[in-house]
Structure formats: C-alpha cells, structure tokens
Amino acid sequence: MQQLGLFDVIRRPPIKKPVDPYGPVLQSEPDYTFRLKHPRMAWDRAKIEIHRHHDGSWMW
C-alpha cells in the first residue's frame, strides 16, 4: 500500500525505463553538477552529475 499526500496529485508518476547493464556508457560532459561541499575537507562530500537523455528526460 502506498500512502499519498496532498501534493502527490500535482506530480506525475515516475518514469521507469528498462536498463541495459551492458549497453554503451555516457561519455559527454554533464549538463548540471550538484555538489555538497564538506565543511572541513578539500573534497566534496557528494557530487551528482545530471545528463539530458536523448528523449528529453534527465538522468543521473
């Protein structure tokens, strides 16, 4: 059972696509990069690269 909230009416359902684990690897530069900087260290705590899919959807 899935509990829905008040704002779930506004959102569309998630898109689920089949995955080809042995398919080609994305080699292009990311369109967006989100970073969560570490408060004390020089490297990032987290980094997510967002790429535009050929059908217009986004993937990370």
Image: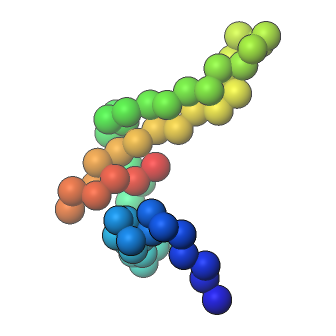
- Could you tell me residue 36's position as x and y percent? 62, 27
Say which of 42 and 24 sits in front. Answer: 42
Q: How many marks?
A: 0
Q: Is residue 3 left or right of residue 39?
A: left
At x 35%, y 65%, the residue is 10
Rendered image coloring scheme: rainbow
Res 41 visible? yes
Quadrant hosting residue 11? bottom left
At x 65%, y 20%, the residue is 37
Say which of 55 and 1 sits in front. Answer: 1
Q: Quadrant of the N terminus?
A: bottom right
Res 54 visible? no
Q: Is residue 29 above or below residue 50?
A: above
Quadrant hosting residue 28? top left
Say which of 37 and 31 sits in front. Answer: 37
- Could you tell me residue 33's position as x and y percent? 44, 31
Most extreme residue toward the left is 55
Q: Is residue 24 above or below residue 9?
A: above
Most extreme residue toward the front is 6
Q: Is residue 4 left or right of residue 24?
A: right
At x 41%, y 42%, the residue is 50
- Could you tell me residue 49's position as x and y percent? 46, 38
Q: Is residue 35 above or below residue 2?
A: above
Q: Is residue 60 above or below residue 4?
A: above
At x 28%, y 58%, the residue is 57
Quadrant hosting residue 53? bottom left
